[in-house]
Image (cartoon, rainbow, N blue to C red):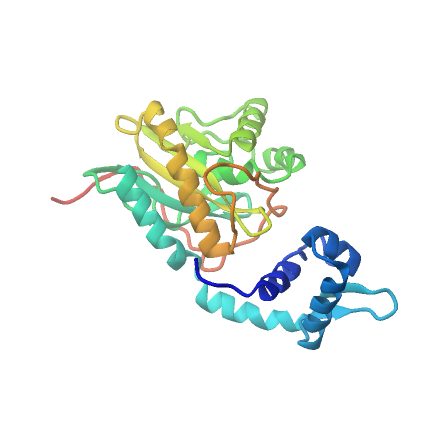
Amino acid sequence: MAATIKSVEKAIDLLFLFDGDRTVMDVKTIAGILGIPLRTTYRLANTLRNRNVLSIEERTGLCRLSPRLRRLLAAIDDSADITRLSGPFLAALARTSGETAQLFLPHGDEVLLVEIAESPQVLRAGPRKGQRIPLHCGAGAKAVFAFQPPEEWGPYIRRNGLRRYAPNTVTSPRKLKQDLLSIRRSRFAVSHQEFIPGVRSLGVPLQDATDRVMGSLGLVGPDTRLTLARARALKPLMLETAAAISAAVWGRAGAAASGSARPSPSPPRPGVVRGAYPVSRSHFSRRQT
């Protein structure tokens, strides 16, 4: 492993303690969370304040991130394109599994299929890139929906109903909530003929550095090939790939396929993803040979 500068690591760890739920902290709290001496924490905080990335109230000693950090957002948008960063992982998953790999992001009451890596098999199945899928349909969508706050499940059902798209679409609110609770526990979703007839799909959540679910990784294929037993056997590979994408795209470290960390709920009703565009539904396709 390459040599690192411990003080820089601690300073970065300090900055990442702040999030949407914890915008202000005092130095004593920061020291306790990081597990470092109070004197060291004061030196780190003062150094970050001198570089104008941390603000410290003189009277109370409360710390918060400096507005200067907003300058980094433009750089992130330009360089950390989600589809570009996830593409190699999707391609590797498609090659290893033999099925089509998918990347879903939240899109209001739907998920948007923003990227795919096609199966190397002649017979393929699944929705097309750019397609929007209701949150109650299929493993990829449910792997996002399950980690939204449970109190939002009922309002979704009341807003949209549970429209049937395929033979096994879940149309019972009680059954849907049971499915979502099961996915929250296992971090793995499997569905069969919920959105497209004859198709089985798999889904696992993608998490950011604070363990918040930002989207999902999916696999999809014809049910004659992607059997239930084979779907279950692919779970470790799915979790490993999801951990790699989460690290590359959202900077999440640790808690890989072992499942040692549990996803946090997603933000309430996430908005439209940049670059979203609708495409008509698809079904089965064959490669030209």
- Above or below residue 105? Residue 68 is below
Task: Say which quadrant the N terminus sits in.
Answer: bottom left
Q: Is residue 32 left or right of residue 140?
A: right
Return the residue nearer the eye: 259 or 71. 259
The answer to which image quadrant residue 140 occupies is: top left
Q: Which x, y percent locates residue 230?
A: 32, 27
| In the foreground, 261 or 184 | 261
Q: Is residue 283 above or below residue 13?
A: above
Picture quarter containing residue 235? top left
Quarter of the image where the C terminus is located: top left
Left or right of 78 on screen, residue 267: right
Q: Is residue 128 above or below residue 11?
A: above
**In the image, what residue occupies the spot 43% across and 37% down?**
203
Q: Of residues 54 and 151, which is closer to you in this image?
A: 54
Which residue is pictured at 33% across the width and 53% down the height? 88
Residue at horizontal 53%, vertical 54%? Answer: 272
Q: Position of residue 7 (x, y in %)?
A: 61, 65
